[in-house]
Amino acid sequence: MSACVPTRAADSTRPRRIHQSHSPPPTPPRRFRIAGADLSASIAVFLIALPLSLGIALATGAPLQAGLVAAAVGGLVAGRLGGSPLLVSGPAAGLTVVTAELIHRYGWRTTCAITVLAGLTQLGLGCLRVARTALAVSPAIVHGMLAGIGVTIAVAQLHIVLGGTPQSSVLDNLRALPDQLAHVHPAAVSMSTLTLLLLLAWPRIPGRVGHVLHKVPAALVAVAGATATASLAGLTLPRVDLPSWSSHALAGLPEGPVLGIVAAVFTVTLVCSVESLLGAVAVDKLVTGRPGLRSQVGRSDLDRELFGQGAANVVSGALGGLPVTGVAVRSAANVRAGAVSRNSTMLHGVFVVVAALLMVPILELIPLASLAALVMAVGIQMVSLHHIRAVTRHREVLVYAVTTLGVVFLGVLEGVALGVSVAVGVALHRLARTRITHEEKEGVHYVQVRGQLTFLAVPRLSRALHLVPQGADVVVELDGSFMDHAAYESLQDWQSAHFAGGGAVELTGRAGTRIAEPASSAHCRCRPWTPWRNHQCETSPGPQSVPPGSQSGGPGEEADASRPSGHQLARGISAFQRNTAPLVRGELARLAREGQRPSQLFLTCADSRLVTSMITSSGPGDLFVVRNVGNLVPLPGEESGDDSVAAAIEYAVDVLKVRSITVCGHSGCGAMQALLTSEPGGALTPLKRWLRHGLPSLERMAAKDRPWARLARRAPADAVEQLCLTNVVQQLEHLRAHESVARALREGVLELHGMYFHVGEAQAYLLADGDGAELFAHVGAAEDLRHPA
């Protein structure tokens, strides 16, 4: 949708270009262009993918060229046909154990055939549009599978790191480890140690030099450093051996038992599909973190991605390559490097082809011990402490542990099957085991529910609730994470009946935290999601008045004329203490211990209608907020003794290390109205002294040589809205004049964003450049970020 450019009422001399409807301008032919950001990102991804592809091929026991084939096909085929434009595909560490077992059992040519059959299966699943069902697998199973594969990789590659040869299973590798430690190869150990040291130290180089050096991938630096050292020192140790492409083995007809081949195809399909789809979801999250990128690449089409991965596996297997899957690490590097389209993924595949054909003499200098150390580090990283904490928090550590051990000692398919069985058993156990007790203490009846409250527990819940005498005070403690509709209806019906009989009910969660207030129509007629204006409980006439704290008002609500404002404030505080504080106490306690670490400074107006946490969906600790009249940023040295805004900027950038600063204006701003209507002269009140910092915005709007700031969907409604938009742009320029901001921008650690919030429409607009003018784009509509015709 093209943006509409407003014309100025005071400037009627500006020429207009009018195209007649019967003679549209000719459409120029589309030319294939590669953005500079895509080119630089593709080089970064290529430099990561090249050593990893060789290392993964080494770990599987496949021909080393098979890793290069898979990387090239993943970039070209999956990159062109896949549904996630920035997802980088190729050989992945998650498939190392599976592929190694297939090669050991069936040989290389049959393994390639299995890869082709797995690709055909993925093509069928993509056509059936069942991609999202793969995301139904419990995260504990997926993380456990990856952790098990990581342990298997690390133990196997440890033998190559020490100068030996790995065995076929984890148990055999563990049994052979003492003998291997007694016969280490000094040259291999020294190159492996150097690789690991460079791999760990490179990302930790501090300062401005480190920021520049970090653009070179650590994996490339580690392998290149070990290769150069081994060559200069003349060390004798096994190196990469790439046979001639004329002798490269292609896929053959599958040979082996039918059931075994079918199980192998199923295993490769499962691991490839799940890892690729999870990678696509992870890329979507990374893209969301880059303002403006979502409109260019869009959300991933998971069914198309599955289709693209299937096509890549068919081609890779037919050409004698490893199985292909979406790789999260390379994809994250692609997004961070600034890629804006699928051209970056495809170009990295082209670079792999060029390297495989022209860089063979250089690649054959790489020590195998260096590649083994690189892959071993990747395997160790697959055992993520973050994942372990997450599954422990959700009480699924048993599923994670069983899946991990099953993959390590039995195999990937067997381990996943065990994990699924345990996950189903845990779910059934949680649903079926519910303890309901009733007791009386000091005249108060306590009904405690331990476990999930489903229809299976409704009869026992009903019996326990009917033991409570009519008119008694009751506390119902729900210690569980799930309540189905039948249990909810039963509890609500009893609660209403108990209120009607004069009783009092308090619903609490674990440890007695209150989770709900009594909800009786006789006491309060507020409903969930009631509009915030006048969001107050309406008291019924008569003696049944609402106790203070039963409901809180919302942002921007009008004061109750019949009550003093102090009473209204006390009611709001009381409601917070009863309803909200128990829910946020744990998070606030954590923030109190760890201190604040907000990700951005949000500078906006003091207008009561702007609720920063609401319009940004943020919570405690997320935003460092500065509010003032007119969301103004005085230039350095012009605050006349009041350096509060400058101090907040300096503190946010230099101390809190925020990654972005957002200046947010809004519609109907009283400060902008005052700027437009104020007359020169008169008494210099505090408000007038402050608003002088907005005069540059007035001058900017009146300048003939500057384009007007504009909205994407429509022209600004009036001069006030035009000034509100222009003011955001001007204050961003004032921000750049602050020393701390300018320094952070030069170092590339800070971003500036402009935002406009239309109060009446409840719509946010973000600032983006369009044809040299300041364009405020409608958030959520991808077409609005395109440049206007």
Image (cartoon, rainbow, N blue to C red):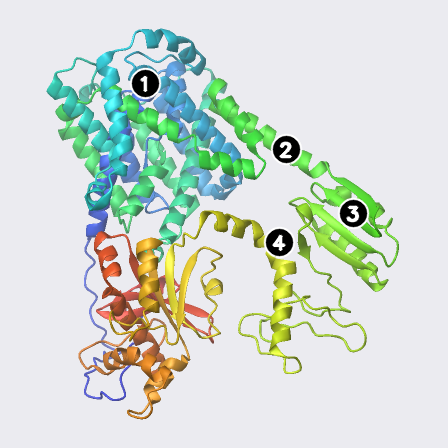
Q: Nearer the viewer, mark 4 or mark 3?
A: 4
Judge from the rendering whether residue 620 lies leftward or rightward of residue 632; answer left or right: right
Tags 2 and 3 touching, CB below 8 Å: no
Residue type at mark 4 is Pro
Please name whichever residue, 752 or 165, is drawn nearer the observer in this view of the structure. Answer: 752
Location of residue 130 in the rendering, given as x and y in whole percent from the top left corner: 49, 42
| Residue under label 2 | 426
| Residue under label 3 | 447
Give the SS element for disc 1.
loop
Residue 704: quarter of image:
bottom left
Give the SS element for disc 3.
strand
Residue 28: quarter of image:
bottom left
**Which residue is located at x 24 percent, y 57 percent?**
745
Q: Nearer the viewer, mark 1 or mark 2?
A: 2
Q: CA distance from mark 3 to mark 1?
A: 62 Å
Q: How dense is the environment of label 3, judged by Cα within 10 Å: few (below 14), some, or many (20 and up)?
A: many
**Residue 297, can we see it?**
no
